[in-house]
Amino acid sequence: MVSKAESANPASSASGKAVKPSDFDYDLVVIGSGPSGQRAAIQAAKIGKRAAVIERARAVGGVCVNTGTIPSKTFREAVMHLSGFRERGIYGSSYRVKQDISIDDLLYRVQQVVRSEIDVIRNQMTRNRVELIESTARFVDPHTIELQSASGHGRRQITAEKIVIACGTEAARDHHIPFDGQRVFTSDDVLGLEFLPRSLIVVGAGVIGVEYATMFAALGVRVTIVDKRPVLLPFLDHEISAALTYVVQQSNVTMRLGEEVAEIHMLQGVSKPVEVRLKSGKVLHAEAALYSIGRVGATSRLDLDKAGVKKDDRERIPVNEHYQSNVGHIYAVGDVIGFPSLASTSYEQGRAASRHAFGLRIDHEGGIGLFPYGIYTVPEISTIGKNEDELTAAGVPYEIGKANYREISRGQIIGDRTGMLKIIFSPETKELLGVHIMGEGASELIHIGQTLMAHKGTIDYFADAVFNFPTLAECYKTAALDGLNRLSV
């Protein structure tokens, strides 16, 4: 975070003279057209400001639409449908909608959705009178940005009173790894794959790595996960993490946890050309490797130093509570500022930054304080609030209640026998403190718990409420009754 003192910086020219807002080409320029950039620009336009969004050619929608959230979740839906994964609990583990699934089958739907999303974004910009400039951008000074066309020829400069940096992130790459985008690739390269490997080593078991590992495993790819941490997604509630680990192992995924990669080599003339050597001495071979060791801010091309904007060692921009950088009129939002790096929170960050920039009131930071996580592994996971370990560390008393999908009629109908919903609540007030879900529809179900938590509700509501039958939402009632029974023991 940057201090308020650092962020106080009146509009001025490179010469140090005060500049009037009317002297600028735009009231607001946003660098990046992802969720946070879209919302920042549209918010400004809605209050009559001259707003423009700069985005690289053929990248409208930013990382979210082109290589991140939208394509990866669409890829997952294609996997779930074509592999028949959702129906295996009913028809058996060998059930498949399509026997020979190709990479083209999976990417066909992805490309459709991406094109549609880009059209929607362009229409929203036009409808709200936001100018979309398809160029690369770099700072000349704190109020001036140089644009370069996709052809690399035409250049021009524009000025803005306020600037929002919403350029997102890119996959981290180690220089000693032999990336070729096909045999050794990052999550940003998935949409460019030309074949579906029969075996895959996933280096890095963060959210993105585990998501893709479970997707490929659902297709029947033999997957090996390598990560230096001893537990899968350790930030999750320990029961959810353990349950995910069990399901992943049942999907024939090999996990090499507590291991670090020493080297990756490309071999010639063999069926499994990717060789991964671990520091423990183990050697792994596969047709391909997904290298997923995190992401860094996509700021290296922006010449932030010319604007005086500071960044950290992962190319991210530190901001204060209003999303201001150390240069007061320059804001940063979305993944480029780090945690929580979610499309959902990025939308609200963009709106909040724009409102603050033009002196508008901000209500509860756009609801960013209480937000759910959606993890699109197979099976799906979603969580909100505190988990057991966090409450124990803080010395906060709690009780839990659980419901298993296999005990809910809807769970039986859809064949999800591993899903579960867990609530954590105060034994004194019964106030809901956290909800943790694994299973079909988790990212949708979480919002019921979110609503109750936002209104400081108690689990008595769930115990007394009437839910549609049969639905997965009944898990809340079952979990609440389970929790109340624990209190009465």
Image (cartoon, rainbow, N blue to C red):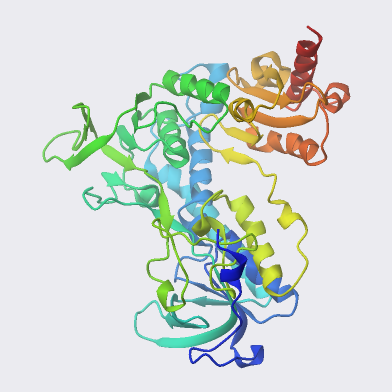
Q: Residue furthest left?
A: 269
The spot of residue 457 in percent (x, y) is 83, 33
For residue 424, above or below residue 148: above
| Quarter of the figure with residue 268 | top left
As drawn, is 306 to the left or to the right of 288? right
Q: Residue at x 56, y 48 (%)?
A: 340
431 to 25, vertically: above or below:
above
Residue 313, horizontal then vertical, whole percent: 39, 57
Q: Is residue 440 left or right of residue 400?
A: left
Q: Is residue 274 visible?
A: yes
Q: Is residue 390 left or right of residue 229?
A: right
Q: Residue at x 47, y 87 (%)?
A: 157
Q: Residue 45: where, in percent of width, then height?
A: 70, 75
Say which quadrant the C terminus sits in.
Answer: top right
Front residue of this view, candidates 286 and 346? 346
Q: Nearer the viewer, residue 318 or 39?
A: 318
* 478 relative position to 368: left or right: right
Image quarter of the N terminus: bottom right
Where, by quadrant of the figure, is residue 430 drawn? top right
Note whether residue 65 is visible.
no
Please tell me which residue lies in front, 17 or 140: 17
